[in-house]
Structure formats: structure tokens, C-alpha cells
Amino acid sequence: MTFEGYGNVNEVEQFKGSLLKVPEDQLGELAEGEYYYHEIIGCNVVTEEGEALGTIKEVLSPGANDVWVIKRPKGQDLLIPYIDDVVLQVNIENKLVTIHVMEGLL
């Protein structure tokens, strides 16, 4: 990544830890099954049986895979790992995520 008008890394050091916003029309294409955080946050989450679980409020990146934080209507937030065995379908247009509830997930 480069910053127009800045010649070296020392000049952009002041921005370290800041939030970088990119216009949507300048975002790069992602591979199938990859999503930008802003596309995922706000999606409703349902089980494969159709039970509504809540809405994705945050995406965590602790290591091997992302973890989606689901705000539940009542009770504690739910943490869902973004792995193939759990996340069955993501429909960005309809803001809907369908998951398989593995044993111990809820």
C-alpha cells in the first residue's frame, strides 16, 4: 500500500492505528466465500431449521478464522466461527446468514 504525497514509511507512521476508509467503488474484488466486514455486520443469522438467532454486530479476527459476534434479542452475545462446517450460506443482498448449529455452539 502506498499513500499519495508521502515518500517513505516514516512519513505515514503518524497514521498507525487509524481507521482507513475506502470508497465502495474502489474496493478490490474478493474470492468466493470472502466478504468485507461492512457487508457482514448487520446480517441476520438463522439456523438451517429457520430459527432466528440475532444480528451480526462485530467481526473478530483472533487467529485461524474470523469469529462473528451475534447480538441476540435476549441474553448474551453468541460467537460463531466463520468455518465451512458452521456457516452454510451467506446472502449479502438479503442480509441473511444461515448456519449449522454444531454441538455446544449455543
Image (tube, rainbow, N blue to C red):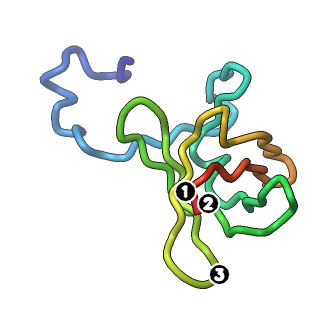
Q: Classify residue 51 by image quadrant.
A: bottom right
Is residue 89 toward the left or the right of residue 6 in the image? right
Q: Give the numbered dot on residue 81.
A: none
Kindly identify the amino acid type of the residue bearing the numbered disc 2: Ile
Estimate the x, y position of residue 14 in percent, counting from the top left: 17, 38
Q: Amino acid at mark 1?
A: Gly
Mark 2 element type: strand
Residue at image point 61% right, 60% down: 56
Nearest-to-viewer mark from 1 and 3: 1
Identify the mark at residue 104; answer none if there is no mark: 1
Disc 2 or 1, which lies upstream in sequence? 2
Q: Is residue 80 left or right of residue 2?
A: right
Mark 3 nearby-residue class (10 Å; few <14, some 14–19, many ≥20)? few
Q: Residue at x 57, y 44 (%)?
A: 37
Q: Which mark is residue 56?
A: 2
Q: CA distance from mark 3 to mark 2?
A: 12 Å
